[in-house]
Amino acid sequence: MKKVPLKNWDYFRFEELRVYHKAIDYAVWLRVVTTGVNEAHKTETAKLVNAGTQIAMLIAEGSVRNRSQFVNHLKMARGQIR
């Protein structure tokens, strides 16, 4: 039986991006800073923490797609920053 060589997948390793690590650090920082917030502002802080987490998630998700979709995911991550 003939062995089939492994396919060389072209994907981008998002773990090597500084912006990905900065996004993770930002999400962790947001969680630490917002832990002592009173109940009146709990929904606003939850939205802020979610947006911080979405930045890293969009970068990771876009890295497995083709180049144009990756660029689109980076633009969506930039929108989460704003």
Image (cartoon, rainbow, N blue to C red):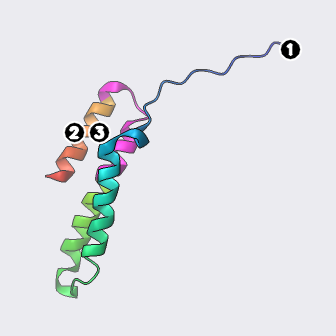
Question: Residue 40's spot in the image, x, y percent?
Answer: 17, 85
Q: Is residue 5 left or right of residue 71?
A: right
In this rendering, is residue 20 above or below 6?
A: below
In this rendering, is residue 80 above or below 2?
A: below
In front here: 31 or 42? Answer: 31
Q: Is residue 61 magenta?
A: yes
Q: Which residue is mark 3?
A: 73
**Amino acid identity at mark 1:** Met
* Label 3 with label 2: CB-CB less than 8 Å: yes
CA gap, disc 1 to disc 3?
42 Å
| Quarter of the image where one finds residue 37 | bottom left
Question: Residue 12's spot in the image, x, y percent?
Answer: 42, 31
Question: Residue 76's spot in the image, x, y percent?
Answer: 23, 43
Q: Secondary structure at mark 1?
A: loop
Which image quadrant: the N terminus?
top right
| Quarter of the image where one finds residue 2 | top right
Q: Residue at x 40, y 31 (%)?
A: 65
Q: Residue furthest right?
A: 1
Q: Of helix, strand and loop, which mostly describes the magenta segment?
A: helix
Q: Earlier in the sequence, mark 1 or mark 2?
A: 1
Q: Is residue 59 magenta?
A: yes
Q: Is residue 73 left or right of residue 13?
A: left
Task: Return the mark for residue 1.
Answer: 1
The magenta stretch is 55-68
Density class for disc 2 (Cα within 10 Å; few <14, some 14-19, many ≥20) is: some
Q: Is residue 9 left or right of residue 69?
A: right
Q: Which residue is mark 2?
A: 75
Q: Earlier in the sequence, mark 1 or mark 3?
A: 1
**Amino acid identity at mark 3:** His
Question: Residue 46's spot in the image, x, y percent?
Answer: 26, 71
